[in-house]
Image: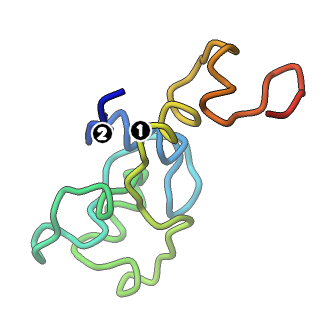
Amino acid sequence: MPYRGVLLNRQNIFRRDNQTCQYCGSKDDLTIDHVLPRSRAGVSSWDNLTTACRTCNSRKGDFTPEEANMKLTQKPFKPSFLLFLRDFSGNIDEQWYTYLGKKQKSGVGI
């Protein structure tokens, strides 16, 4: 199978972060936050983008999380294609669990 990367977009960042603000855990009014702000040469990449609610994003502003005294619950990362399929894509046909390394719904481990 040819290599497939995970497209960097808003929806996939929200999926990776479980539709949860990575600062306070809220699931309401979500936005995308640049961990290192764009005004300080921060780029739009998997390692610099995270999910944040509007309140936390505004509070953080043009600061890094450390400067704003805000802690990330998980460090942003680039998911591999298989990891993304296995953990973030939603419904998976049980026949694929063998290849993706995920436990079957029936409870039988692979």
Write the residue at 37% across / 37% down: 12
Find residue 21 and report its horizontal and vertical position in percent: 49, 53
The one of 76 and 105 positioned closer to us in this rendering: 105
Find residue 85 and report its horizontal and vertical position in percent: 50, 31
Q: Which residue is mark 1?
A: 81
Write the residue at 41% across / 59% down: 77
Q: Specify the quadrant of the image occupied by residue 10.
A: top left
Question: Can you name the residue that lies furthest to the front here?
Answer: 1
The one of 27 and 40 positioned closer to us in this rendering: 40
Q: What secondary structure is marked by label 2? A: loop
Find residue 71 and report its horizontal and vertical position in percent: 51, 75
The one of 78 and 63 positioned closer to us in this rendering: 78
Query: Which amino acid is tagged 1?
Result: Phe
* Residue count near mark 2 (Cα–Cα under 10 Å), binned few <14, some 14–19, many ≥20: few
In this rendering, would 41 be left or right of 6? left
The one of 11 and 47 positioned closer to us in this rendering: 47
Find residue 37 and report its horizontal and vertical position in percent: 20, 70
- Specify which label sits upstream in the sequence, 1 or 2: 2
Above-or-below relation of 22 to 10: below
Write the residue at 56% across / 61% down: 24
* Residue count near mark 1 (Cα–Cα under 10 Å), binned few <14, some 14–19, many ≥20: few
Total number of numbered discs in the rendering: 2
Colour mapping used in the image: rainbow
In this rendering, would 109 be left or right of 64? right
Q: CA distance from mark 1 to mark 2?
A: 5 Å
Write the residue at 53% across / 64% down: 74
In this rendering, would 33 be left or right of 110? left
Is there a contact, CB below 8 Å, between mark 1 and mark 2?
yes
Q: Which residue is mark 2?
A: 5
